[in-house]
Amino acid sequence: MKYSVVIPFLNEQESVLEVYDRLRASVEAISDDFEFVFIDDGSTDETFALLSKIAEIDSRVTVVSLSRNFGKTEALVAGFQHAVGEYLITMDGDLQHDPNDIQLFIDKLDQGYDIVCGWRVTRSGDSLVARRIPSKVANWMMAKLSGVPIHDFGGGFKAYRRELIRQLPVYGELQRFIPAIASHYGARICEIPIRVADRPHGRSHYGLGRLLPVFFDLITVRFLLRYLSRPMHFFGGIGMVVLAAGFSLAILLAFLRLVLHVHIMREHGPLLLLSTTLVLAGVQLVSIGLLGELNVRQSHKRLFDCWNLRVLTKRKTRMSS
């Protein structure tokens, strides 16, 4: 199987059948080497029942049902685990994405790109204050902090090379940061403009309330990209600054006590407490950095051992042949 179309659904009973009909008509005009992986992310309506009926009549359809609503990222990860295609194409299940644009993504994949992102240039159905301005600000921040120069991180219409996506640590709500994480692995990434229709049924599951979690995820990704393999550079750096401040205060207090014979507890009790706290906090931060380095070392050792085992296995196979 060459292509897997992965679509998560959450309470989309009005859209399920139309999404399938449009998708089937579009991909059959492209190739017969497609499969469909539909994920029901804990819907409380008839979404799963409709998906099950589709799977009964079309052997290319695989339905994954989650026991509750885990979120879009976990739904996509579940879909990726069940997909067998060489390339994975993700779409939203609310009829806003046009399946006819799939050919544009395939063209870019054929050019050697590992990830192709859909860029929602125009979004007519979105409120200027509630969606467009916050989205532009968030995407600008993501591009600057991640170093990936694309305009639309949050769009659900993307295409991935399967062998790459299986290596990425994606969890929580990090699906929008897959391009940023993949760039750390040397992935080739591009962006294409796509058409986005108004949502015909229901309402969006996203709003201003998602901005704060996105900001937290952005900090997480920034940390992962810069310090995942060298945690001591982060914790140790801060720890040494805190230690230096604590020892500086301690030296000052020692000078006041030993030279000027000042009663430290009576005159400068809060400074003594602050100095002690800074020293302890600095030691703890440096210790966390060291523990992180040990953890990273063990992870890299396991990866090296697995890689070395594969090499030895290949060599033995060649010798025996």
Image: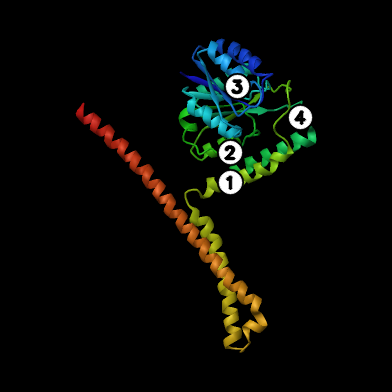
- The local crowd at label 2, few if under 14, some if 14 to 19, many if 20 or more residues have their Cα within 10 Å, is many
Task: State which tag comes first along the sequence, 1 or 4.
Answer: 4
Q: Which residue is mark 2?
A: 174
Q: Which residue is mark 4?
A: 126
Q: Which residue is mark 3?
A: 48
Q: Give the amino acid type for the residue marked by disc 1 in the picture.
A: Thr
Quarter of the picture holding the C terminus:
top left
Task: State which tag comes first along the sequence, 3 or 2.
Answer: 3
Label 1 to label 2: alpha-carbon separation: 9 Å
Q: Is residue 129 left or right of residue 22?
A: right
The answer to whether residue 113 shows anywhere in this view is no
Label 2, secondary structure: give it: helix
Looking at the image, which residue is at 41% across and 46% down?
299
Q: Give the amino acid type for the residue marked by disc 4 in the picture.
A: Asp
Q: Which residue is mark 1?
A: 220
Label 3 to label 4: alpha-carbon separation: 28 Å
Assess whether mark 2 and mark 1 are in contact (beta carbons under 8 angstroms).
yes
Label 1, secondary structure: give it: helix
* Residue 61 screen position, x and y as percent: 53, 17
